[in-house]
Image (tube, rainbow, N blue to C red):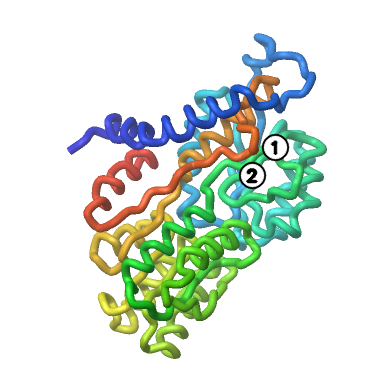
Amino acid sequence: MLTNQRVVKQFAVYVAMTIVAAALTSCSSAPSTNGDRAPSTAADKAKKVKIAFVTNNASEFWKIAEAGVRKGEAEFNADCEMHLPPNGTADDQQRIIEALIAKGLTGIAISPNDAENQIDIINKAAEHMAVITHDSDAPKSNRLAYVGTNNYKAGREAGKLIKEILPDGGQIMLFVGRLDAQNAIDRSNGIKDELEGSGIEILDTRTDLTDRARAKQNVEDTISKHADIGCLVGLWSYNGPAILEAVKDAGKQGQIPVVCFDEEDGTLQGVLDGHIHATVVQQPYEFGYQSVRILAALARNEDPGIPENKVVEIPVRIIRQNEVKQFWDELKAVKGS
C-alpha cells in the first residue's frame, strides 16, 4: 500500500511535465501579460493576495479543485474564497461576481455557465481585477487565460470509447447540465466529430440544469422510450452516477453500456464494478492550483507563465476498470479523505 505522501507525489508527477514544463516553456518567448507595470518588490511578495475561485455548480467534483486551491494558497501566500453557485445558474454566478467586485479583490477565476451571455459580467470584473477562466472557457471575453481541459479533445476521447462499445454502429443519448456552457459545447462537438462515419447516431442531448433528480429522470425516459439504446453518455460529473442509478432501477445494469466524464465516487465505483465502460477524467486539483498560481503572480506583477495562446491546458486521463483502484487511492490522498 502506498503512503499518502508517495501517492500525492505520483498524482502530481504525471502533470508536471505536461502542464508546468510545457506551459512555462511555451511562454518563454510569449509577450508578457504584465504590460509596463513595475516588477514586484519584497513588500509585494510579503503581502497576502486576495482572490476568488468561482465554480459553475456545487458538484462533488469541486472538492478536488478546492484541495488544489488550498495548496496554492499555502505556496503563493494567497487567500482564496471558494464560491459554488447553489443552483448552478448564470444568475447565481452574476450575483457572486458582482459581490466579489465590490470587495476589491485582486483576481478571480471563473467557470462560466453561459460563455456567450456572460461576456459583459466577465468584462466588468476584468475592469477591476485580473480575470481568468477555468474548466469552461469564455474566449470572447477579456479574460487573461483559460486553465483547464481541452474539452474538444476530451470529447473525442469519449467518442473513441463509444466506438469501442458500438463497433458496428448504434444509437446513443447524451446527458448534460446545460448546452450553452462552453465545455458542454466542446465535448459534444468532439464526440460528434469522432463518431462521424461510424454508423453511430446521437439521438439527442438531454439537459437537466444541474438538477440531479432531473438528470436521473432524463435517463429513465430514455430507457423507457428507446429499449435498444446502445450507450448512455454523461458529459458532466454528476451525470455518471445519475445514469447508473437509473440503469440500476430499470434492472439494466450490464445491459446498457455507459461512458461518462469525471471522477465522482459513484462513477468510479461503477467503472470498478464493470457497469461503466470507462470515464474521461479531468484534473480539477490542477484547475485550482494553477488558477491560484497565476492570479497570485499577476497580483505581484510577476510573469504568470501564460502561453501565447492564453490556454494552460490540463490533460485528461481515461480510467478503465483495471486502473480504478490506483487512481482512486491517488484521489483520496489528494483530497485528504
Q: How many labels does the image show?
A: 2
Q: In this view, does 247 lie to the left or right of 49?
A: left
Residue at left 51%, top 35%? Answer: 289
Q: Is residue 280 left or right of residue 31?
A: left
Q: What residue type is labelled 2?
A: Thr
- Label 1, secondary structure: give it: loop
Locate residue 247, reporting x and y percent. Answer: 35, 78
* Residue 99 higher or lower than 202, as above or below: above
* Residue 256 tag number: none
Location of the C terminus by quadrant is: top left
**Distance in Å between CA atoms under marks 1 and 2:** 8 Å
Q: Which amino acid does label 1 sit on?
A: Leu
Location of the N terminus by quadrant is: top left
Q: Mark 1 points at which residue?
A: 144
Q: Name the residue under label 2.
A: 133
Locate residue 327, reporting x and y percent. Answer: 30, 46
Closer to the camera in the image, 214 or 315: 315
Looking at this view, name the residue that lies furthest to the left: 1
Closer to the camera in the image, 139 or 41: 139
Residue at left 68%, top 21%? Answer: 300
Residue at left 28%, top 69%? Answer: 275
Residue at left 43%, top 82%? Answer: 220
Looking at the image, tell me whether mark 1 or mark 2 is earlier in sequence order: 2
- Dot 2: few (<14), some (14–19), or many (≥20) neighbours within 10 Å? many
Locate residue 232, reporting x and y percent. Answer: 41, 74
